[in-house]
Structure formats: structure tokens, C-alpha cells
Amino acid sequence: MQKEITIKTNKKYEIVDITNEIEDIVKDVKEGNVTIYVPHATAAIIINENYDPNVRSDILNALSKLIPEGIWEHDKIDNNGAAHIKAAILGPSETVPIKNGKLLLGTWQSIALVELDGPRSRKIIVSVR
């Protein structure tokens, strides 16, 4: 089964929890895996803590310190070289096991879209096997 969802982001840099949307898609799956994939070169999918919002801020702040803006060759084209590098490091997808309609995430884990060049409307492809 494959589904597509769309998430609208509101900021240039943003981490959006999409766990509920993924849970809704897999609720009838007895056992398998779900892959969450974002087909965009300046966005990523991660699994990390969502309970403390400071974790999301820390991730974005760390990325900004590691990969500064405005010094990349690609910036000469559309000024988002840092977003491409950050997305490449984080990666476009994550896979999570499913059992009895539940995502087998850890206690504090959630699935998130990382926006690195927003605001935009981002397509996410969800494949269940």
C-alpha cells in the first residue's frame, strides 16, 4: 500500500511532527514496515524526541552552526545551498516496523518532517509493506 500526504510548513526552518498522520495510515496493518519518504532536496524525515520542544530547536540550531548560510557554490543559483547539505545529511526517509496497527517507536520517539527551505507545501510518500 502506498499513500501520499501533504504538509504545509510555515517557517524557513521547522520540524513538524507527522506521527499522527502515519499512525492513521498504518492502523489496520497487522505486521510490516512503513517507509516515510520526502521527495524534496531541501527537506528531510527524522525520528527523534517530540516530548520536549527544545529538542527540535536544538536540532535546528546545531544544523545552523554546523552548516552556515551563504557560503556555498549552489547559493549562486538560488541561495539555498545550506538547505541541500542539511537535507543530504539528515536523509529523505525513515522506516519503522508495525505490529497490530501500531508503530514500534520508542517511548519518546516521533516521526518528523524537517523543513530546511520553507515555507512550502511538502509531499510525503508513505509506503507500507
Image: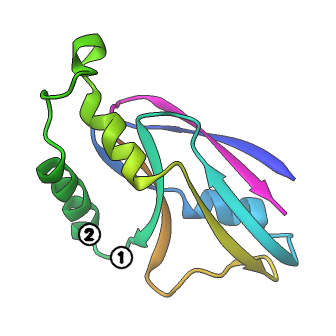
The residue drawn where x is 63% and y is 57% is 21
| Looking at the image, residue 82 lies above or below residue 112 | above
Marking on residue 51: 1
Marking on residue 72: none
The reply, left or right, for residue 19 in relation to residue 81 is right
Disc 2: which residue: 55
The reply, left or right, for residue 113 in relation to residue 74 is right
Amino acid type at mark 1: Tyr
- Between 53 and 79, the one lying in front of the other is 79
Q: Which residues are magenta?
A: 116-129
Is there CB contact under 8 Å for labels 1 and 2? yes
The reply, left or right, for residue 8 in relation to residue 68 is right
Q: Secondary structure at mark 1?
A: loop
Pinpoint residue 102: horizontal percent, then vertical percent.
Answer: 72, 78
Q: Residues within 10 Å of mark 2 (few under 14, many from 20)?
A: some
Amino acid type at mark 2: Val
Note whether residue 53 is visible.
Answer: yes
